[in-house]
Image (cartoon, helix red, strand yellow):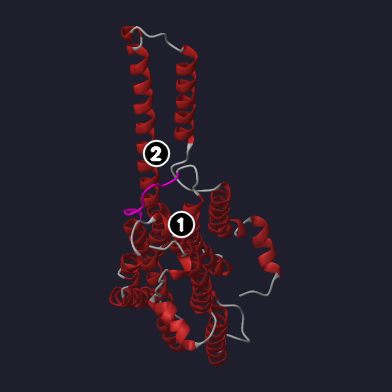
Amino acid sequence: MTDDPSSDYLPSTLLEVTVERTRLSWSQLAAVVGFVLFLLLFGIAFMTGELPGPYDPSFWIPGLMPPVIVVYLLLRQSRSRRLRNEAIKAIRPLVKLDDDHFRLAVSNASLFNRRREWIALCLGVVAGWLFRVVLGFTSLWLSLYSILFGGLMFGLMAWFLYSALSGTQLFNELNRHTHDLNIFDLEPLEPIARWSLGIALTLIGGITLSVLVTVPSFSINLFMNPQSVILYGSLITATILVFFLNMYSTHRALVRAKTQELKRVRLNLSKISKALMEHPDQGRPVNLEEFSNAITSWVTYEKRVKEVPEWPYTSQIRRNLLVSVFLSIFAFILPWMLRGVLFQFLLKLLPIG
């Protein structure tokens, strides 16, 4: 077995393979897809008379949502892939499997199961079609555009959620084979925490973007209808689950290592106490200073073990998560702020339909 991370086999997901076949970078592909979708939308706007006319939220909101979210997910998946591979490489030295079995464990993970990836993608597309049809549109062309590319948007969202949740199973499997974990050196586990945070931030950012795109409508009803409640509720729930489930197996590995270390400490303290009690019976002088130093050392060590965190989250990771959650909450309350008295007064002065 070798500890060289470069020797690890890191397979690709369905979307990653598709992007590689285009021979474009993630940012280049996102730019091309975004340009095409925006061009189609403006073409529809020109044909339907929406482009030179007043701003119509019923046209632009369902039209702008797909390109914005699709481009965002493509850009974020590039970083998510890098963080995932860094996490796999970081945990490699801790996993007591030979190279062949390690590669097998990674490549057989449901994260890289093509059939399941296609199922998740297709279910998302179908859900997107149903959701977009329920909303209703102002024109036939916008209806076709929104159903096609809205389905693509929901399909990518469903695929991303599937890859995030199935990635949890991958690290659950790898953490089952971790041994001799140094609880005082959590650096090898921090990439897993950063990957988990990256997924959570992607979901939070997607929710925030979708809310900001709808802000120009100044409509509170968007957040009150059952379809939107189900959609945003599901995304928020998935964000919380992904963030904690991705780290739960790592948390259990740390708890297991701490428990074993505390057992060793208490066993040594028990031996010292037993030896101290047996000395008078054996008629030998007792070196109290030696026993005192030994007990003090083990008690101090026990305190250090107890202070070791059971979740490998650095202060920066926690801070980034809190800031992102705050920004997301701000985006949700922004429509209410924009409906204030001052903005209503300004609205009357602006040529906005």
Task: Give the CA separation, mark 2 to mark 1.
Answer: 19 Å
Residue 188: horizontal and vertical position, in percent? 48, 54
Q: From this viewpoint, is residue 236 visible? A: no
The label shown at residue 39 is none
Q: Which mark is residue 258?
A: 2
Quarter of the image with the N terminus in it: bottom left
The answer to whether residue 218 is magenta is no
- Magenta stretch: helix, strand or loop mostly: loop
Residue visible at 57% across and 83% down in the picture: 28
- On screen, 217 above or below 262? below
**Residue at x-position 39% and y-position 30%:** 265
The foreground one among 306 and 243 is: 306
For the point 57% across and 90% down, the residue is 46
Residue wearing tag 1 = 192
Residue 340 place in picture, x, y as percent: 62, 56
Query: Where does the image place residue 176, in percent across and percent down from the top left?
Result: 31, 53
Name which residue type carries label 1.
Ile
- Identify the element where label 2 is drawn: helix
**Closer to viewer: mark 2 or mark 1:** 2
Q: In this orientation, does residue 77 appear?
A: yes
Mark with earlier residue (2, 1): 1
Label 1: how many Cα within 10 Å (few below 14, some 14–19, many 20+):
many
Seen from the viewer's position, the closer of residues 162 and 279 is: 279
Tags 2 and 1 touching, CB below 8 Å? no
Q: Say if 286 sits above or below 246 in the image.
A: above
The region drawn magenta spans 175-182
Is the residue marked by circle 2 packed among few (<14), some (14-19), or many (20+) residues within 10 Å?
Answer: many
